[in-house]
Each structure stands twice: as structure tokens, then as C-alpha cells.
Image (tube, rainbow, N blue to C red):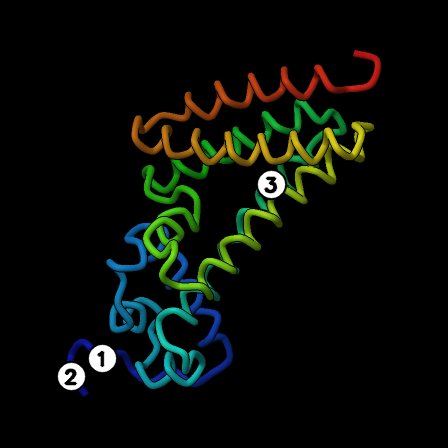
Amino acid sequence: MNAETPAPTTGPGTRERIVRATSRLLQRQGFEGTGIKQISREAQATLGSVYHFFPGGKQELAAEAIRHGDQEFADLLREGLGSTDDPALAITACTRLLGEALRESDWQDGCPITTTALETVGRAPVIEQAVAEAFAHWRAVVEEKLHGAGLPLADARDLAATVINTLEGAELAAQIARSEEPLHVAGRHLARLVDTYRPGR
């Protein structure tokens, strides 16, 4: 066994470590910049373990990592949205959490799926499907909050798409600027927009 090969890991959690490592590497390096050998090293798993769990290779693994990133982002959205009954304030809570997470990662960990999505569009249907499902999931999380706050379903659905689209752009701008301000600005304006749709406003 050479110095670059990790010790075999066969206990519970190997698959999860592989998926988590892949998700983080894809988030920071993209699909093309991430190799199976690097994934195995980061996950402290053998190459054999990686191919055992993901016989379809890198695309199958990337799709599973996208699903992992999808759940991470959805959990963050739920945390922010669940922090208050007021839907406008809940949106600003989401932007605050996103900003804090970005700053804590030294501006490296933006949207968990964007880089891979852009690199593989039109070339990897299994990844495209996972990406489409992730965005639909995030929209549904926001839509549920807005509709539960009294907005008509059609408005809640359209606003949810606007919220997710805006958060994606603001997160990228925050990474480039190395500042939380683009997210705070987006949060304030999204909150005002949501308020205009609320019953009685």
C-alpha cells in the first residue's frame, strides 16, 4: 500500500463519508476538477470502497452528492424559515444564515450544486435530474412557508421561485465580494416583496 492510499475502511459510515467528501469537493472544485482518487483520500476510504458503493463511477457519485447538498441547503432554509411566523422576516433569516455559513467557510462553500450543475449541463442526464430535483425541493420548502402564512398558492409558488433564484445570485455575489452584504440586501428586498403579497397589506 503506497503512502497516498488510505487504510481500508469497512465499518459503518463509509458510504456517508464518501458522499460528504464528494459533495464538499464538488462544491469547491466542480465536477471536472474533482477526481475519484481525491475523493477516496478525503473520505479516508479505499478506491475499492468507492466503486463498491458507486459502481456507476463518478457521475453516479456526483448525483448522490448533489442529493446530499440538496438536503443540506433545504435544512438551512427550514431553519431560517422556521425561526419566525412572519414570512418576510423568515426570508431575511435565511439570508443571514447563508451569510454566516459563507463567512465561516472563508467564502468557499456557496451553493452546494451550482458549479457541478453548470459544468455538466447537457452532458450528464443523471446529474441534471438530481439538480432539477434539488431546485424543485428548495422551491417547495419556501412555497410551503409562504402558503402557510396565508399567501394564495399561485403567488406562493411564483414567489418561492423568485426567492430561490435571488438567493442563488446573491450567494455568488457574496462569495466574489467576500462580504455578507449582497445577501443582506437581497433579504431586505425579498422581504419587502413578500410583504406586498400578504393578505391585508
Q: Report which residue position mark 3 lands on.
A: 77
Tag nearer the camera, 3 or 2 = 3
Up the image or down, 57 lies above or below 141; here it is below
Q: Helix, strand, or loop for circle 1?
A: loop
At label 3, the amino acid type is Leu
Q: Report which residue position mark 1 lands on.
A: 5
* Residue at image location 64% in from the left, 34% down from the top: 160
Residue 97 position within the rendered picture, expressed as x and y whole percent measured from the top left: 52, 34
Up the image or down, 170 lies above or below 196; here it is below
Residue 42 can be seen, yes or no: yes
At label 2, the amino acid type is Asn
Residue 74 position within the rendered picture, expressed as x and y whole percent measured from the top left: 59, 47
Up the image or down, 46 lies above or below 171; here it is below
* Residues marked 1 and 2 touching at CB (< 8 Å): yes
Residue lying furthest top: 201
Badge 1 local density, few (<14 within 10 Å), some, or many (20+)?
A: some
The quarter of the image holding the C terminus is top right
Q: Which mark, residue 2? A: 2
Tag nearer the camera, 3 or 1 = 3
* Residue at image location 62% in from the left, 20% down from the top: 191
Q: Which mark, residue 163? A: none
* Residue at image location 57% in from the left, 43% down from the top: 76
Residue 71 can be seen, yes or no: no
Taking 176 as reference, is 143 left or right? right
Pointer 3 or 2: first along the chain: 2
At label 1, the amino acid type is Thr
